[in-house]
Amino acid sequence: QFMLNHYHTNDEINGMVLELAASSPFVTASSIGTSYEGRPLTIVKITTPSNDRSLVKPAIFLEAGMHAREWIGPAVIIYFIAALVNNYNVDPNVRAIVDHFDWYLMPVSNPDGYVYTFQWDRMWRKTRSRTEEQDVSSRRACAGVDPNRNWDTHWGERGASHKPCSIIYAGQEAFSEPEVAAMARFLMGRKSRIKLAIDFHSNGQMWLTPYGYTRRYPMDFEAQYMLAVDATDELWKVNNTIYIVGSVANSIYRASGDSIDWWYDVAGIKYSYGVELPGKGYHDFILPPSRIVPVGVETFEAIKYMALEVMREA
Ligand code: 0X9
Ligand code: ZN
């Protein structure tokens, strides 16, 4: 019932999610907070209703849209939602992972920015918050904070800016952005249950591990790296799309206060990844809608692989 080969507006996405929740007993939609401009921060939960109500399931968290212009992320999360629901009766692996885990999927974690890319500026990246300092300069371009520099671990260090006009502006303080603070609260409340968490961005075809703030590797790097290498091998089999695997700081550049450093170091989620989806080179952020399904199909193979492996590890 979803139109998958199409980039949807924020309102359309919320509408689709509510409709699906109303029609499927596997799916619950809720809001984990409110954006700066007052939009709901919608999250979808998918799992098989269990007879044993005291059973607490392990969980997987998949989120996209932190950076407004990276439209392939939200589109891919919507593809995952459809794939988990529609393939439950078709693919025994999907059945196993939907039975075993609580899946939390958040298609648009920065809805104000996402809406702004539809209405005003296709290349907007940050949130749309305004501080007094930003109002004084009164330049429209200076609104917003980079939500992927706003997390409370090594906040504002190398690879982040303290200048409000920068596209990597860290904000006035860590967790200044309501969207980021809401996600942090959500994860903290479920941290021991969440076994795998992925922050989807674009572009560049990289499957990234912590850290962003330093080139040093964390204790779990080897396990994180091996799982990502094997999962991107599965991904490659679909359309021969090549991914690079490595830590953020060693593969792209240093980025302090980024999501996965906090997910890993503070929330303690062992398998925390940042994924840079296609394209690479020519298409960059403006991936034609005809690419949504192929990217969704291949990326879902990697997700399935990771979920099955994490399930076996427990
Ligand atoms: O600069 C960033 O935030 C990421 N690149 S992007 O082009 N999508 O802006 C790189 C950092 C990756 N880290 C996480 N995804 N947490
Ligand atoms: Zn990004």
Image (cartoon, rainbow, N blue to C red):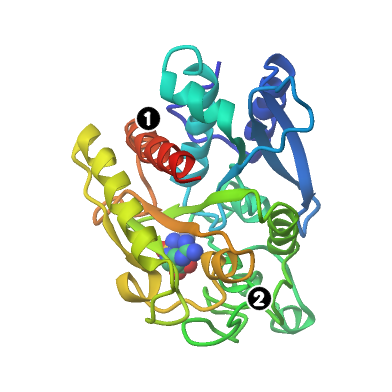
Whether ligand 1 has any atom under 8 Å from the Cβ at mark 2 is answered as no
- Is residue 282 visible in the rendered structure shown here? yes
| Residue type marked 2 | Asp
Q: Is residue 160 left or right of residue 230?
A: right
Vertical comparison of 61 with 136: above or below: above
Decide which of 141, 311 is in the foreground and name it.
311
Vertical comparison of 58 with 147: above or below: above
Marked residue nearer the N-terminal end (2 or 1): 2
- Evaluate if marks 2 and 1 touch, with contact meaning CB atoms under 8 Å apart: no
Residue at horizontal 71 percent and vertical 82 percent from the top: 172
Residue 292 position, x and y percent, is 39, 34
Residue at horizontal 38 percent and vertical 48 percent from the top: 286
- Is residue 205 visible in the rendered structure shown here? no
Residue 183 position, x and y percent, is 69, 56
Q: Badge 2: few (under 14), some or many (20 or more) residues near its Cα, within 10 Å?
A: many
Distance between the alpha carbons at the discs numbered 2 and 1: 35 Å
Q: Give the label on residue 293, or none.
A: 1
Residue 81 position, x and y percent, is 55, 30
Residue 58 position, x and y percent, is 62, 42
Front label number (2 vs 1): 2
Identify residue for label 2.
152
Q: Secondary structure at mark 2?
A: loop
* The quadrant where residue 105 appears: top right
Q: Give the label on residue 161, or none.
A: none
Q: Quadrant of ligand 1?
A: bottom left
Residue at horizontal 51 percent and vertical 60 percent from the top: 270
Decide which of 306, 70 is in the foreground and name it.
306
| Residue type marked 1 | Val
Q: Secondary structure at mark 1?
A: helix
* Circle count: 2
Decide which of 169, 229 is in the foreground and name it.
229
The quadrant of the picture occupied by the N terminus is top right
